[in-house]
Amino acid sequence: MAGASLLSLRGLGKDYGGRVAVGAVDLEVPAGTIFGLLGPNGAGKTTTISMIAGVITPSRGAATVAGHPVVAGAAGFAARRAIGLVPQDLALYEELTADQNLAFFARLYGLDRATAAARADWALGVVGLRERRGDAVAPYSGGMKRRLNLACGLLHRPALLVLDEPTVGVDPQSRRHIFDTIRALRDDGMTVLYTSHYMEEVAELCDRVAIMDGGEVIAAGTVAELVDRHGGPPLVELELAGDAAALVAARALAARHGALAGDDPTGAVLRLPRPPQLGPLLADVETAGATVVNLSVVRLDLERVFLSLTGHSLRD
Amino acid sequence: MLAATIQKDLQLLARDRGALISLFLLPVVFIAVFGAFFSDDGGGRRRVLVVWAADAPRPAAVVAALEASQLFELRPATSADEVRAAVAAERAHAGLILAADFDPAAGRPAELAIDEALAPPVRLPILGALTALVHRAVFPPPAGADRPVLVPRTPPGVQRVLRDVDAFQLSVPGNAVLFGFFLALTVGLAFAEERRWGTWRRLLAAPVGRWRLLVAKLVPYVLVGFVQFGFLFGLGIAVFGMRIGGSVVALVVLAAAVVLCAVALGLVFAATGGSEKRMGSIGSVSLLIMGRIGGAMVPRAIMPPALKAAGLLVPHGWALDGYFTLLVRDGAGLADIGPQLGAVLAFAAAFLALGVWRFRFER
């Protein structure tokens, strides 16, 4: 599935005055993949993709897209033609119809009228908006606007589709439609760079992920690789039952086995962060007068990876 | 790409009621209102004079002289009090009370009922005309000695003025310049909207040179400026009877300079104006002040000297001087508006330089 790098970043960074927005990002995005750029708000994701798309000029480093250098002026046009940017803002002319928006953006990429019309029809089909093509965009729902925003980025059939938080403020149905569209585009050979601060989205959608924080890429790989490398061992979670005194005693005894209090506010949940010797632990719990009513292995996720790498939560 | 941008921006403008109103509807309303106002103030109509004259030789001679002069629209009154009441109620600009014992030589002048607080441009011509008329009626020159005391002659180097110039000759170009420069605000706001909508990011990401993008964004408004000029002057001619005494070609050239100047000023707004709200408020006030100083609302000719000179600090003043020359001077051409055209183009170049210097593609 994954081939050679379609997008390559070498020490790409951006300063605003004396403030470093993005330090020096090195990244390889394989062709034909959905690549997630995960990080909290302010991590530098939008600045990074803005540099890739040629919207802002990097302070340092270099980027290539499909072998073309991302540089200012005419020398950078080939790279720009290879990129379809779908900004986080709904970058649409809301007083115009979907067709008028698409016609304008298509011609901006040098498509003649006939090709522009054909591509608009195709893009509207991809995002499921053909029926509303003649309507002004303003009264569209948030999800429909997001889909049209995506269609505008597809018109010139870019090799790299760059999506900046494309599901912000959309309903579940539209989110599902956007996900299905992105997968279909990937299956057709398009490479997708997808930024989000939603861990679940990235985990569900992306073939590979880079985690950004404080303007740096702090880890990259598949979700499984990241969890293996940075998530630590699996957790075993015990749910106890019993009166308050029994639960207190059980927690005290379980602590000898390395058990930690879980998320449950009643103190009835214990977590074991390393592979436990369950037999002695269960015996101690019973001795304390409590009963184990549930035992499960907690699935490790990118949230835990992020926490492990940065010491703070993705949602902080 | 240029054609696509022009088409897109015109489509957006066609749906922008606020911009259409400020560029096309408001100027028409202002032209009509101010044109009518200044006409009523003396442009084409005579001042109303209410007269009560006692049945005596001297008053009768004065009334005869007033009627013969046709300088005033005379309305007879039945008493002196009726004259005073008509002036107080502003049914007449002035009133003349000619009592039976009216005899200036004996120290018994006629009474001129007039609001002494009237603006000098209105009050003084009435006073002057009546003084001369009454004086000639009471102290007629000897027979055979009635000679003109002055004759109006346009000095060499100044074209002949069109006959029957009316207030629309001032009102149409005045408002065309005032609202023509409001195009600058439309341009500035168009850039601010592109940034707010996020479409500016999409434009920057396209395989188009940034300066080409900037030019393409400005060109539609140059076209809009020409349409506005054609619309307002066309309406002025067709509906308000405005006439062009000078060269139409020169008028179009001057209009082109004014449009370029307004669009270049729009680039300054785009580069320095900040948010739409800030740009809207500061821009509107700036343009109104410029228009006021430049004589777009009140002709500079009747302004105090200091304000009249200040009018040349803004392009509006130069543009209006040029338009007035072309409208009211018979046969005036490009050579006659050289300084005005040059000044407007110099302002355009300065605005363009400032706008380009301060404009930030990435913000």
Image (tube, coloured by chain):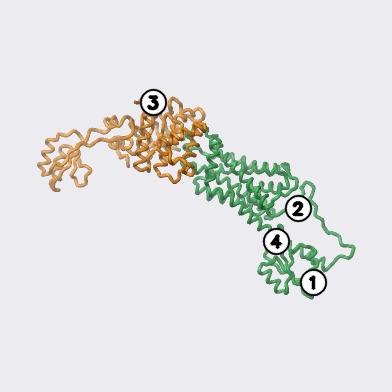
Q: Can you say whether A80 is above or below B292 in the image?
A: above
Give me the residue at 45% from left, 40% from top: A133
Q: What residue type is labelled 3?
A: Ser
Within 10 Å of disc 4 (Cα), the crowding (few <14, some 14-19, many 20+) is few
Q: Which amino acid does label 2 sit on?
A: Arg
Q: Do labels 2 and 4 share a chain?
A: yes
Q: Are marks 3 and 2 on the same chain?
A: no
Residue type (three-letter) at the residue carrying disc 4: Val
Secondary element at image label 3: strand
Label 3 sits on residue:
A5
Looking at the rendered image, the disc whose residue lies closer to the viewer, 3 or 4, is 3
> Mark 2 Cα within 10 Å, few/some/many (few <14, many 20+)?
few
Q: Which chain is orange?
A: A
Kindly state the secondary structure of the residue where label 2 is placed: loop
Taking the spot 75% from the left edge, 45% from the top edge, the residue there is B331
Indicate the chain coloured green by its letter. B
Q: Read off the chain for label 3.
A: A
Image coords of residue B112 (percent x, y): 73, 69
Q: Mark 4, chain letter?
A: B
Report, in whole angstroms, how far the alpha carbon at label 3 lies from the one at label 4: 83 Å
Q: Residue furthest left?
A: A287
Residue to which mark 2 is pinned: B163
Q: Which amino acid type is shown beneath numbered disc 1?
A: Pro
Q: Mark 4 points at which residue?
A: B122
- Residue B209 lies, in percent from the top left, at 52, 32
Q: Mark 2 lies on which chain?
A: B
